[in-house]
Image: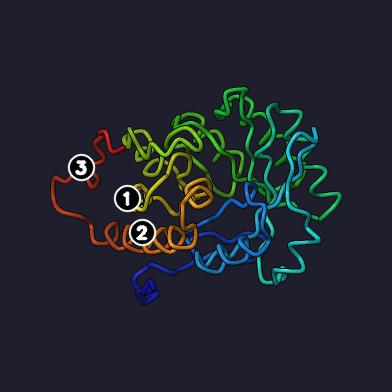
Amino acid sequence: MSVTAPGDIGVDDNWLTLGGYELTSRLLVGIEQYTSPTMVRQVLEVTNSQVFITTVDPDNNRPSLLLSDLADELPMDRYLWIGTTSFARSGSSALRTAHILRDSYGIELLKLDVRDDGNMPDNRATVEIAATLRDQGFSVLPFILPDEQDAAALESLGCSALRVMAAPVASGRGIPDPGPIRRIIDGVGIPVVVEGGLGTARHVTLAMEMGASAVLVNTALVEARQPLLMAASMRSAVEAGRLAYLSGGMPGDEISTGLSGAVG
């Protein structure tokens, strides 16, 4: 069981406001890979997640849980609904997904993913689609490779937060090169969420020690032999890493100085 530190030291304070909803939990959980509504409920409860991330596959290539089945299991009105385009493999597919989510469910808070055929973020297309979605009134949280210029461009478009890839999605490699991510965290004025390849509590703690506002995990929970134990460890890791970041760290340590290094 994790122990939540007092809010006045910044562990469970508000780090992002979306749709008038204040997010205090710094652990976001993807649910696209689950096949059991009960497991989705349990994971959301254990991680203390405040958001429900949903999507559609405009190309109908991937099976997913029915929202009707989830509604029977989950108190849906307790969560902030965020749409995602995580199945999109082109800018046009991402736009189509966003419009389906808005037309079908009224969702205008969007976790924007535009990935190439290798499942890597396409930064150029992401910036272009983010500009279009912002013009159309969406709140956007784009997913990019760690590039400072692209991060600055997305901030200038009015994106609500940035999601920066640590390592290839589902790789479990952790954060092989913290330096570029740390420079984005220090260089932008909006929250930065670290995700991709976070396979253990150690990886999550490091991301939070670097100053990330939050982390997003998915595959690490789905593929764990005991998903709920992994979920609990990730929640504790977020809290530990946040406290370490707020402490300032030891003088000269790698994280506090922003130096890169292999931390797989």
Whole-percent x, y for residue 260 in the image: 26, 34
Assess whether mark 2 and mark 3 are in contact (beta carbons under 8 angstroms). Answer: no
Whole-percent x, y for residue 226 in the image: 46, 58
> Which residue does the numbered mark 2 point to in the structure image?
237
Assess whether mark 2 and mark 1 are in contact (beta carbons under 8 angstroms). Answer: yes
Whole-percent x, y for residue 167 in the image: 43, 34
Can you say which quadrant of the picture contains the N terminus? Answer: bottom left
Q: Nearer the viewer, residue 248 or 27?
A: 27
Where 14 sits versus 96, above or below? below
Kind of residue at disc 3: Glu
Kind of residue at disc 1: Arg
3 left or right, relative to 143: left
Whole-percent x, y for residue 97 in the image: 77, 39
257 left or right, relative to 67: left
99 left or right, relative to 122: right
Q: In the picture, residue 255 is in which quadrant? A: top left
- Residue at the spot 55% in from the left edge and 28% down from the top edge: 120
Where 5 sits versus 206, above or below? below
> Which residue does the numbered mark 3 point to in the structure image?
254
- Residue at the spot 36% in from the left edge and 38% down from the top edge: 175
For marks 1 and 2 on the same chain, the one whose residue lies earlier in the sequence: 1
Kind of residue at disc 2: Ala
> Which residue does the numbered mark 1 point to in the structure image?
202
